[in-house]
Image (tube, rainbow, N blue to C red):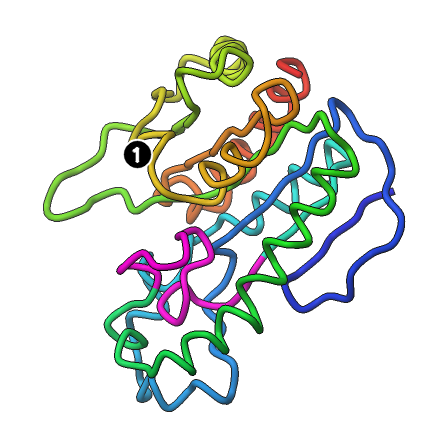
Amino acid sequence: MKISIAFFAEPFTTVKYFMANLIITCEHGGNRIPKKWQDLFPAPCPELNTHRGYDIGALRLAKYLAEQLSAPLFYNEVSRLLIDFNRSIGRKNQFSEFSKGLTKKNKRELIDTYYLPYRQNIEQIISSLSPVTHLSVHSFTPELAGKVRDVDIGLLYDPKRPLEKDLARRWKQKLPKIYRVRMNKPYLGISDGLVTELRKQYSPSDYVGIELEVNQKILTMETEAGNIEKTLAASLKEAL
């Protein structure tokens, strides 16, 4: 049985125990703007179709991993340019230049309507399945601020949590050398985000959180995307 839940789905009532109690999430799965908020993004709005609008290729990858590993999947398709599901409430970059000018009331509405239900569904299943291994799936732009990133796959974790460190290392060992696999790159595993917030709620023995970052250059090439999807699924299954 596979559970796939978008931010707008009704809460599920039953769960199944999976391999290593694995759950998969994708916080930046799409670039959708709900009708009420579309006036904030005058058409055409090219930013919505770039890495700023969503994590290109991440949702397809997350769905494939969830299917192959029989894991429940939680994903969001509202653009991060409206509200960023991977930022904590109160962080200045939770709202972009398009939405930061909204009133406190409107921002609260976005949080209550989209952000909190998504996070609360995830917290619900973690509490039900504990201990849990959580994989948060993301992608990153190959070049940022004129600098080309020398990373194909990034495995992000908290170095102070031994189980996370061990899983990340074992996963890296299972991955082919043809990929440039980096630990805690292109971002630090302890930066603000969903996984970091969940670590504050659950002990290291109850919650193991890994963020997977994949280069969009690979995910936008059909053949390469298919290859890396299969490779990531098989290697993670072995690592778990």
Q: Is residue 120 left or right of residue 197?
A: right
* Above or below 99: residue 56: above
Where residue 68 sits in the image (x, y, percent)? 73, 34
Where residue 76 sits in the image (x, y, percent)? 56, 60
How packed mark 1 is, by other alpha carbons closer than 10 Å (few <14, some 14-19, many 20 or more), is some
Where residue 79 sits in the image (x, y, percent)? 44, 67
Identify the element where label 1 is drawn. loop
Q: Is residue 8 left or right of residue 101?
A: right
Instruction: Name the residue located 58 percent from the left edge and 50 percent from the top edge.
Output: 60
Q: Quadrant of residue 178?
A: top left
Q: Is residue 70 left or right of residue 103?
A: right
Instruction: Name the residue located 50 percent from the left edge and 34 percent from the top edge.
Output: 200
Where residue 240 sits in the image (x, y, percent)? 67, 16
Which portion, as a residue range, is magenta? 76-94
Which residue is nearer to you in this view: 13 or 186?
13
Q: Amino acid at mark 1?
A: Tyr
Q: Which residue is mark 1?
A: 187
